[in-house]
Image (spheres, helix red, strand yellow):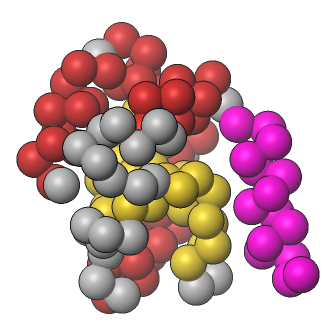
C-alpha cells in the first residue's frame, strides 16, 4: 500500500468532530441514495468526502485553512480537483457545528 493510502486510513481513524458529524449524516446512504466515501486519495491529494456518482468533493476546513500558505495550497488543490472534473465545496468547521441545515442545503443544490 502506498503512503497516501496509509495516510488516508490514518485520517479516517482520527477524524475531527466536524468530520464525524457530517459522516454520520452521509454514510448511511440514506442521503438522496448517494454513496459517499471519506478520506479518499485523488491524485496527489486526500479529500475529506467524495460522491463519485455526482463528481462531488466536500472539504471541511478548520482555522488553519485561513492562513496565507494554506489558502494558496487550497486554491491549487481545488484547481487540480476541478481539472479532473470534480465539483468542490468547502465548509468551515463552524458551518458544521452551527448550521448543518445550511450545509445540506448547499450539498442538495450540488447533487
Identify the magenta region: 1-15
Q: At which x and y percent is residue 60? A: 47, 42
Q: In which quarter of the image is the N terminus?
A: bottom right
Q: Determine the image quadrant of residue 17.
A: top right
Q: At which x and y percent is residue 67? A: 53, 46
Q: At which x and y percent is residue 45? A: 61, 73
Please tell me which residue lies in front, 29 or 105.
Answer: 29
Q: Magenta span has 32?
A: no
Please tell me which residue lies in front, 66 or 40.
Answer: 40
Number of callouts in the render?
Answer: 0
User: In this image, 49 relative to 82: left or right?
Assistant: right
Dominant secondary structure (helix, strand or loop) of the stretch shown in magenta = helix
Residue 98 in the image: above or below residue 18: above
Residue 75 in the image: above or below residue 25: below
**Residue 22 appears in the picture as rendered:** no
Residue 43 in the image: above or below residue 105: below
Which residue is at a point 73% across and 47% down the rendered structure image? 12
Which residue is at a point 26% across and 31% down the rendered structure image? 103
Q: At which x and y percent is residue 99? A: 29, 16
Which residue is at a point 31% across and 69% down the rendered structure image? 53
**Residue 11 appears in the picture as rendered:** yes
User: In this image, 11 relative to 53: left or right?
Assistant: right
Q: Residue furthest left?
A: 109
User: In this image, 93 relative to 44: left or right?
Assistant: left
Q: Determine the image quadrant of residue 76.
A: bottom left
User: In this image, 28 relative to 40: left or right?
Assistant: left
Q: In which quarter of the image is the C terminus?
A: bottom left
Amino acid at each position: 500500500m502506498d503512503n497516501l493510502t496509509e495516510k488516508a486510513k490514518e485520517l479516517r481513524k482520527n477524524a475531527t468532530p466536524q468530520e464525524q458529524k457530517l459522516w454520520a449524516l452521509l454514510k448511511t446512504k440514506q442521503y438522496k441514495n448517494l454513496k459517499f466515501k471519506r478520506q479518499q486519495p485523488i491524485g496527489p491529494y486526500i479529500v475529506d468526502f467524495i460522491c463519485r456518482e455526482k463528481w462531488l468533493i466536500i472539504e471541511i476546513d478548520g482555522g488553519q485553512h485561513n492562513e496565507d500558505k494554506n489558502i494558496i495550497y487550497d486554491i491549487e488543490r481545488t484547481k487540480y480537483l476541478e481539472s479532473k472534473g470534480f465539483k468542490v465545496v468547502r465548509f468551515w468547521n463552524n458551518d458544521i457545528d452551527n448550521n448543518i441545515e445550511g450545509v445540506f442545503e448547499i450539498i442538495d443544490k450540488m447533487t
